[in-house]
Amino acid sequence: MTTTSISNSITHLNTLRWRCIGPPRGGRVVAVAGDPFDSQVFYFGAAAGGIWKTEDGGTYWENVSDGFLASAAVGALTVAPSDTNVIYAGMGESTIRIDVSFGDGVYKSTDAGKTWKNIGLRKTRHISEIRVHPNNPDLVYVAAFGDAFGSNKEASLTRGIFRSKDGGKNWEQILFRSKKAGAIDLSIDPKNPRILYASFWEAYRNFWSMNSGGPDSSLYRSKDGGDTWTEITDNPGLPKGTKGKIGISISPAKSGRIWAIIEAEEAGLYRSDNGGESWVQTSGNRDLIHRPWYYCHVFADPQHADTVYITNLQMWKSTDGGTNFSEITTPHGDNHDLWIDPENPQRMVQGNDGGACVSYNGG
């Protein structure tokens, strides 16, 4: 090709009219994590941009997944508490908007994000949460919502709670509800990791409507590391009737304390102080349950039993056991994930529709 022909080609390109064809969701972040041993290191997973890392407290972020991931939508991100070189990423976000992208399973890094490898569960499509045993980086649990738009005919491969005991080499489905409901949240007790709570959400998405709620939206508890599960959906104090999305969080600061944010006719924040046997509604404030299919997340403070956070359109904080809440002003609304440093609760990273935000003073 001659210099003249190259010049002519550039001239032709300059005459073209350009328009944006997507993706339309690049700024959204629904997965965040932090390094518990390095106060400057945080990670976030973007809805359409892979995995990012900062080593200077959020001033500069670098993409660490380019060239490794086969899909760009990150739904869950977790740093192993006992080995921060080990990071798990679940692909396909579970905030099932009309423009949501599906993923291709779980990726793992063993070098603090420098390289990534797909380790399975490729058909799960939308992964909502990943939890790692506090003392064993190879024992990992995945909450998979499955296909938000499909029939989930292969539900044994797409929906429920999955466990690996060997760092992702082999997986087993340890909890399944139905083809209609996928796992939407998962919490592990860091003081007694044999205790887990999982929630399921009956929901279906198509391009013209969103269907949230049904008899298969449910709540489960395991006391043996996921070998067996007990349904606690209708335990005393929990709302009756049809339920929708449920967020769940175990309090590391007080044994037996569990938080649940529930979409229902009697929607609101619920608390149990006896391991889920009975519950009380601490707040029915509708601001906490705004647009539940898109938000509905609750986070227990790791050191203060009466402090709890809720993320939705705004970010909310209670310091009196969930009765009263005050708004935490964030740089962007539409708040999703939150990671709180287990040793220093003032240090946190939060994901929202505008990106990731770091705080060193509790918000």
Image (cartoon, rainbow, N blue to C red):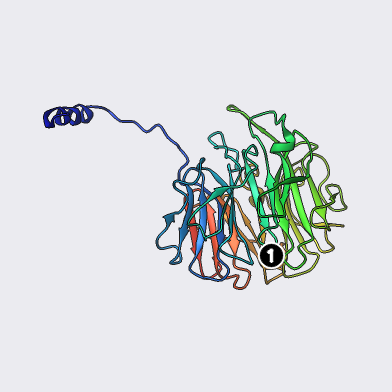
Q: Which residue lies most toward the left here?
A: 4
Q: Residues within 10 Å of mark 1 (few under 14, many from 20)?
A: some
Quarter of image, res 254: bottom right
- Decide: is 295 above or below 133: above
Residue visible at 70% across and 31% down? Answer: 152
Provide residue 128's location: percent of width, then percent of height: 64, 47
Residue visible at 62% across and 39% down? Answer: 122
The answer to which of 267 and 221 lies nearer the viewer is 221
- Decide: is 262 above or below 155: below
The reply, left or right, for residue 119 in relation to residue 265 is left
- Decide: is 82 above or below 180: below
Residue 217 appearing in the image: yes
Provide residue 363's location: percent of width, then percent of height: 54, 65
The reply, left or right, for residue 201 in relation to residue 119 is right
The reply, left or right, for residue 197 in relation to residue 309 is right
Provide residue 134's location: percent of width, then percent of height: 69, 65
Residue 284 appearing in the image: no
Residue visible at 76% across and 42% down? Answer: 265
Query: Quadrant of the image for the N terminus?
Result: top left
Total of numbered circles in the picture? 1
The reply, left or right, for residue 232 in relation to residue 98 is right
Task: Name the residue beneath numbered marker 1.
Answer: 134
Q: Secondary structure at mark 1?
A: loop
Q: Amino acid at mark 1?
A: Pro
Residue visible at 58% across and 27% down? Answer: 207
Provide residue 64's location: percent of width, then percent of height: 46, 53
